[in-house]
Image (cartoon, helix red, strand yellow):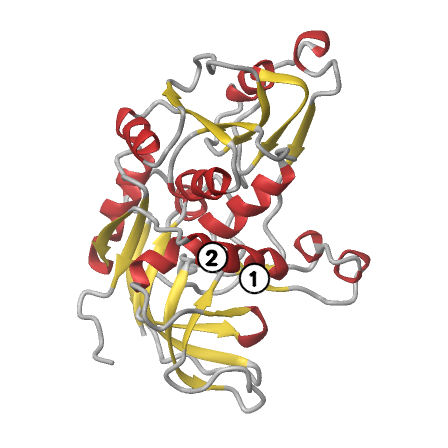
Amino acid sequence: MSGWAVTRPGPIASGPLARVSRAVPEPGPRDLVVRVEACGVCRTDLHLAEGDLPPHRPATVPGHEIVGRVIATGDSASRFGLGDRVGGAWLRGTCGVCRYCRMGRENLCPWSQYTGWDADGGFADLTLVPEEYAYALPEEADPAELAPLLCAGIVGFRALRRSALPPGGRLGIYGYGASAHLIAQVALAEGATVHVLTRSAAARRLALELGASSARDGYDEPPEALDSAILFAPVGDLVPVALAALDRGGTLAVAGIHLTDIPALTYHQRLFQERELRSVTSNTRQDGRDFLATAARIGLRPTVTRYPLSRVDEALADLAGDRVNGAAVLIPDHPPAR
């Protein structure tokens, strides 16, 4: 197996990833060995590489938006056959017996495990995916366009539901990268009015092309009061800005796993009149199934910027610098024949 591992967490310019060669992964009883066709580059991967998220194990291969083909299975694996296309996502394991798992809230399981953090992920040519946490993916689709659905899409979909957007409501989206440009399409398909607020001029253009009613700088006021808002940018300074843009009874959902410090909030100006501030933690597998079904139903199409796997540093640097249009996706330098 050949891939890229986080060996020295730090700024992307310092080269925190190194090329590694390891033995072909041996599947556990319920594992799939997957040959990677594409892997999305998520902002969480950037946080892991730069040390914003502490590593759970040394020299882990990041990447949790994995599209690939099954080339081997564990002895007890039965959901997929050889050659099937599957997706591996951020959530890769839960205990199944704690109170959160039994309540259908497995995203809060204290013993949850994550791809590219607790186990090697998809910045490689081969990886392991537990079959119970794998998703069946369409055979005819472009794997690079499927990859962002598996985290940017799924977690963004949970954030949309956490924002409590009413039917026909007014949604504000702060930050407009991989997740936001997918979820804006879902909200629009469901009849919402979408206002995008982001610092990137290219992202504002993309938002308008995809149907947003307005696109302004992240610190600007939207043209109307918002029923709901989602903060995708990992910038705590935007929390009071987004709260101030909410109408009475509005909800702000913070979608990222990492956020810089939130400044002091003035209760009467920011939270009073039943405004709500909510966090979003990972996703459940049901979120994934619901989102993938929704994406297929509405014909969701990601905008992707492709990078060869050998240029992973460039992909992460472009993500850090807001130079990626839509979602960054790694593809093998020499894609295997079907």
| Badge 2 density bin: few <14, some 14–19, many ≥20, Cα 10 Å | few
Disc 2 versus disc 1: nearer the observer:
2
Task: Look at the image and tell me whether residue 152 can be seen.
Answer: yes
Mark 1: secondary structure = helix
Residue in front for this viewpoint, 198 or 34: 198
Report which quarter residue 162 is drawn in.
Answer: top right
Residue 102 drawn at (x, y percent): 79, 62
- From the viewer's perspective, is residue 15 above or below residue 210? below
Residue in front for this viewpoint, 26 or 14: 26
- From the viewer's perspective, is residue 240 above or below residue 102? above
Kindly identify the residue that appears in the image at 21 percent across and 58 percent down: 310
Mark 1 is on which residue type?
A: Arg
Residue in front for this viewpoint, 197 or 193: 193
| Badge 1 density bin: few <14, some 14–19, many ≥20, Cα 10 Å | some
Q: CA distance from mark 2 to mark 1?
A: 12 Å
Q: Which residue is mark 1?
A: 289
